[in-house]
Image (spheres, coloured by chain):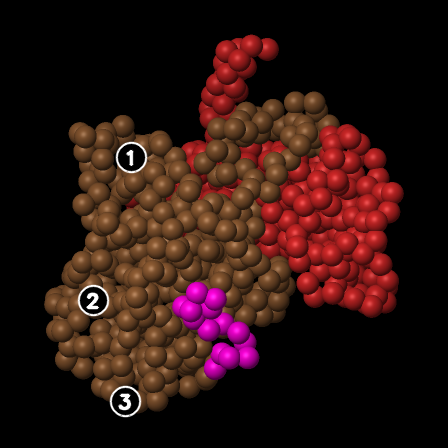
Amino acid sequence: MRERRYRSMPPDDAVGRRDFLKAGGAIGAGLVLAGRSLLAAQQTEGQQPPAKPPARPPRPKTNIEDALKVSRTKWSLPGPFPGRVVEVHDPAAMPDGKVDAAVVKAMVERGIRGLTGKSLKKSFGLFLTKTDVVGLKVNPVGPGLISTRLELVDAVIDWLVSCGLPRRNIVIWDRFDYMLTDAGFTAERYPGIAIEGLQTMDEAAAEGKTQDNSKWLKPDGTHVSVPNFDQEVFYWADVEGPKDLPYLNQHVFNGKHSYFGRLLTKKLTKFINLPVFKNSGNAISMATKNIGYGAVCNTNRLHAPLFLDVCVEVPAFWPVRDKMVLNITDGLRSQYDGGPDKNAKFAYIDNRLFFASDPFALDMVCHNRIVAKRKEMGVAVNENPRFTDYLRYAEKLGLGVVDPAKIAHVKA
Amino acid sequence: MSKLSASAALVLALAGTLAAQPQVPGPAFAPGWAASGTLRTFVGQDLFNQIDGGAEIFLEFGFTALRIQAYARDKAELTLSAYEMESAASALGIYLMRMGRETPFAEVAARNSSEDVQLTIVKGRFFIQVDNLGETPAPRADAAALANAFLAGVADETEKTPLDLLPAGGKVAGSERLIRGPYGLQPYFTFGEGDILSLGGKIFGALSAYQTPDGLSFTRLIIPYPGPEAAAAARAHLQANLDPYLKVTATRADGFDFVDYEAKKGSVALAGAVLEIRFGLPGGGRRP
């Protein structure tokens, strides 16, 4: 495959994370360093950096061309409103840090109407039919602080049900089942609605508390969640996943394929993306990352060499491109630094929701907003265009509109 | 030293370190509290299982182990997260990245930057956070008591760092940071891909914002390499692999000047084993 200009982020990772300790002996180095002058230690022969730093690594090949060969449908990204982003702000949404569900419901209704220019019922028809099986892709990371608010999910469900979609046709989902539970997405909280993780992970085994891997590893050496992924539909990148058991526990597969969840390929006919407004290092972790790294397995291998490009190339495949009809970014409580994990120091109540059918326009608007917030708070921000190159790559692929001159950012 | 004896020494040293670990406090740090769930421990790369992509920066700075213990009293909940790092410099590096505007609570017995919902603390080789995110907020005094109960067992190590090399004149207080690789540098500037500054996952650099007497601001980054040859090689590697959004405008015997994508100016200068990089000076001003 030809070398593309678009390379959204510096892999900025000459020392791959899983190789870091193995290759560098970092624990040992730290023990040697402890209690000594660091400057002196840096002069020590044994601590010399490589004489020749590694050359710029080539961008790994991917199967993006396969995604582009599949014919588009009337539902394909960027949906009916390319480049249109609606922002709804209500200072009463989270008084004293507690969500006012009625206010959030009203915000959702304002946002949908603001996006489509039509009533809630007519808006429903622009995105969905009453026979659809509709997923709600939440972000459960950082529960209690910056996970998708349950009240936002409630409001979306109310809208869907009020327009005739049976509750049994709604599925709240994420990649990891235990994270959904931790964040409060349980059957008890959402009666009649399915709650599905694409995969499980044995936390005790992952933490090394037990050597018993039988809860996740089958006798044939495969992960119990293998059947949850569709091995006919995959994102392929020329990067091997690590072969250790902890990686397999967390990622189900560890080769060069990231398979799409069978939930997306076989069960859901549409879905609504409900990410959270937060950062990931100097970049953002919002609409496109929530789905780019949430729809497939075996993703850790992709962070270093492809990072934000994955947020374009995974959504370019039909299970996302043709089914993800609406995005609502939860900025009721936002986080401008310390992400993607929760970090209360940098979390703040912002009382905002953002609506778009075009997730790339949405992320561009939110990227600019987080940059402004970081500046306001005196946090360093690197405005090198490479941090938004992936969004321009998406525009080039016809998945979104991100040129500021073409984006309509509307406050409803 | 043979590989075997080196490994044995490492194991012994590691065992010694683990034995010296401060204890995670029991629930008696304040009245009425009880442990909530069991102690959770993450070692090395397993940190990804707890904080996902947030682990990158910890590993870059030299992460050893994380212990997490939650405590509950009625609807209040406190969670202690104690990150053991390789060295005091590693812990300080993480702390500086995570402190935001430093807002200390006087009742916490170590350097800290705290809010009611979270205490962020550094002492010796430990970076510590206490989350106060229960349905009902815990009293600030209880959160501090939990932190102090842990801190009492932490050795007060100090370590010289390249922060000492940053000139005092014009330095913006509170903007000092340590870097040890690409993830730490990422929010500040992009010089190129990969290990563009040849830090090798081992060398610390220091950076800070500065203001000139005429009100212009820029950032200064200072990296002491193991020797002049390593520094010269690092400088050559940087210039040869410079980010395509940067353009070299002048080359000198000791370095070069550049402009970035916003027409802001920068410079790279080598002096012995030390590389000094300045960037972010508004265009039209003097060479930084």
Name the disc covering residue A205, or none. Answer: 1
Q: How crowded is mark 3: few (under 14 residues within 10 Å), some or many (20 or more)?
A: few
Query: Is residue A87 or residue B192 the one in the foreground?
Result: B192
At which x and y percent is residue A63?
A: 38, 51
Closest to the camera, between mark 3 and mark 1, is 3
The mark nearer the N terminus, 2 or 1, is: 1
Which chain does tag 2 point to?
A: A
Side (left or right) of B29 relative to B169: left
Q: Mark 3 points at which residue?
A: A119
Q: The red chain is which one?
A: B
Residue drawn at x 46%, y 84% is A410
Q: What residue type is labelled 2?
A: Thr
Q: Quadrant of residue A73?
A: bottom left
Q: Secondary structure under badge 3?
A: loop
Q: In which quarter of the image is residue A70?
A: bottom left
The mark nearer the N terminus, 2 or 3, is: 3
Residue drawn at x 35%, y 89% is A117
Q: Are marks 2 and 1 in contact (CB under 8 Å)?
A: no
Q: Residues within 10 Å of mark 2 (few under 14, many from 20)?
A: many
Residue drawn at x 46%, y 73% is A401
Considering the whole magenta stretch, tell me its main secondary structure.
loop
User: Same chain for the residues at labels 2 and 3, yes or no?
Assistant: yes
At which x and y percent is residue B211?
A: 79, 61
Q: Name the residue under label 2.
A: A269
Name the disc covering residue A25, or none. Answer: none
Query: What whole-number distance in Å separates the C-alpha atoms at marks 2 and 3?
Result: 23 Å
At which x and y percent is residue A341?
A: 43, 53
Residue range highlighted in magenta = A395-408
Colour in which chain A is drawn: brown
